[in-house]
Image (cartoon, coloured by chain):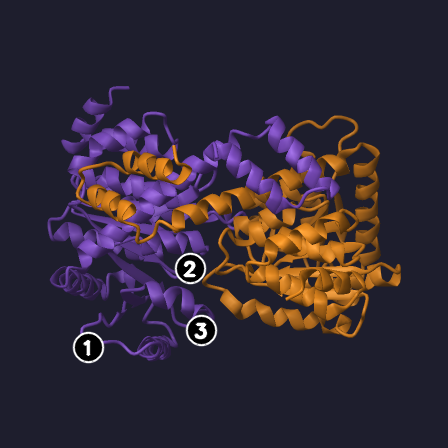
Chain colours: A orange, B purple
Amino acid sequence: MDVPALVAQARAGRPRAVARLISLVENASPLLRETMAALAPHTGHAYVIGLTGPPGVGKSTATSALVGAYRRAGRRVGVLAVDPSSPFSGGALLGDRVRMAEHAGDPGVYIRSMASRGHLGGLAWAAPQAVRVLDAAGCDVVLVETVGVGQSEVDVAAQADSTVVLVAPGMGDGIQAAKAGILEIGDVFVVNKADREGASDTLRELNHMLGLGAPRSAGDWRPAVVGAVAVRGEGIDEVVEALGRHRAWLEERGELAARRLRRAAREVETIALTALRGRIAALHGDRRLTALAGEVARGGLDPYGAADRLVAAVTGG
Amino acid sequence: MDVPALVAQARAGRPRAVARLISLVENASPLLRETMAALAPHTGHAYVIGLTGPPGVGKSTATSALVGAYRRAGRRVGVLAVDPSSPFSGGALLGDRVRMAEHAGDPGVYIRSMASRGHLGGLAWAAPQAVRVLDAAGCDVVLVETVGVGQSEVDVAAQADSTVVLVAPGMGDGIQAAKAGILEIGDVFVVNKADREGASDTLRELNHMLGLGAPRSAGDWRPAVVGAVAVRGEGIDEVVEALGRHRAWLEERGELAARRLRRAAREVETIALTALRGRIAALHGDRRLTALAGEVARGGLDPYGAADRLVAAVTGG
């Protein structure tokens, strides 16, 4: 495969080339290094929006509505739908992807699902690389929608320029239980299905909870809370507007550059960690590891002592 | 804190000492190495049973019923209830722990919840160490119940001598979607709430799915499928019997020793990886990482190239 040619085609807006590059990421291809090096100079343009929330809240529908809104504004849009890692809900939620079908024929939209299974290093490693592909391919906006409920999926959604958290009426208990997790990462909160009973309670509860917590300084971003009925497109312009305000706020304070620096640092760390994990995995079946494990299983050595020797073997220390 | 004295007290059956040792694990205490080294010679006795399944299936009730059954057989029992890492279901499921209250006054039972949040290396790292504490404290059986639905929790449940997977009637779709994940790890399947409508369908479906897959050789373990109503104690003796057969099968073939060797190898790998991750984390705020991340954010360097330099810094290469 000719990586420079593929990158050139992707930059020229050829959907097949974009798809093949993302497949390289998904399959952890040996060509990935060369690919990422070729893409690097063309990245940094896309505005990355993370979307997360509990199952059934309408994430896919909201994502599709946001795609429509950005398209009407003339933006090129990439969508990365990160599928759940939960072994219990498995592929069941993938059917939701069909809701995106309305954008399937639009040359200004790339839509891609990514599975989280089987990745060395998981989502944390692969999703940012796929975002780089969409960025280099000329997307103005990249929406990263995570379908699952696990910590790793929330982490992926939080690795964005702006993060949208969706909730639905009657999920108050869930919000309460999880406030430490999701209230912290949301820049914009969307109460979807706002025509349902309990919507005003959820809006009020959410506003209340966001007002609590550590006292903010005057210049801090106060997360926006928007009611929406994504399936009818209601409230979507307000979500886009709130995202625009958040972006302006980030840019004014130099916080956008700071977020991107942190994101790049985390990305580099994750790849480095994956490389080290690979070195350890390469010892599987290795006599040293088997011998150490045997001593631990017999109680002759504790696992920390054994791990010390393994680390020394891996780092050449 | 006097670690040798604490270990001696734990081995003498003092619950407070056991609790303090598990707290050392949970808090990743600096005394952990010394503790694990002191415990190592006393480990390897306990039979470790993992329990997992989707939310609402009655895991806590089933665990409690199993504790009762093993206690009636005169066994000392440890229970490690690993709490969910999901930011969305959060602490909501912790209330289930009260179902264990019936065993609270029994000196032959240790029950401990462990949170998965905030751990460097997560559950994969901490749970096996807590199992070691219960093992060294003289438990004949250790039940590791995972409350969540994430891959990491399934992994924890699978790191056992025998793994019990619970399902409930009407969860057919979930089983279908997830068969790759949960059908592989179960040695004993329990259809709980077997008095409910659809139970016979679920039993049949489960038996059918377990009969599919790769052709087994004659000596392979055919997972047991048991119907139960854990809340009334029905079917629990059958579960215990199935676990006994599985254990006998493992021992006959030397597979128990092989499983424990694999488990120890994985434990050592996980600790080694956590140590390497710690070295990377120690670079946070380090000039090298900030400088590398800055180059990546500007597009001057791709994240793989940056990671190479970071790995070299960590391993002294």
- Relative to B1, say whether B301 is above or below: below
- The residue singled out by tag 2 in the image is B56
**Which mark is in front, 3 or 1?**
1
Query: In whole angstroms, how far apart are the C-alphas of marks 3 and 1?
Result: 26 Å
- The total of numbered circles placed on residues is 3
| Horizontal side of residue B254 vs B231, given as left or right | left
Q: Disc 2 vs disc 3: Cβ atoms closer than 8 Å?
A: no
Report the residue at 68% width, 54% height from top.
A131
Determine crowd level at label 1: few under 14, some 14-19, many 20+ residues with C-alpha closer than 10 A: few
Task: Give the mark nearer the N terminus: 3 vs 1.
Answer: 3
Q: Which residue is mark 1?
A: B218
Q: Amino acid at mark 1?
A: Ala
> Same subunit under labels 3 and 1?
yes
Q: Amino acid at mark 2?
A: Gly
A104 up-or-down from A183: above or below = below
Which element is circle 1 on? loop
Disc 3 target residue: B176
Residue A128: x percent and y percent?
A: 64, 51
Seen at 61% across and 30% down, the residue is B288
Q: Residues within 10 Å of mark 3 (few under 14, many from 20)?
A: some
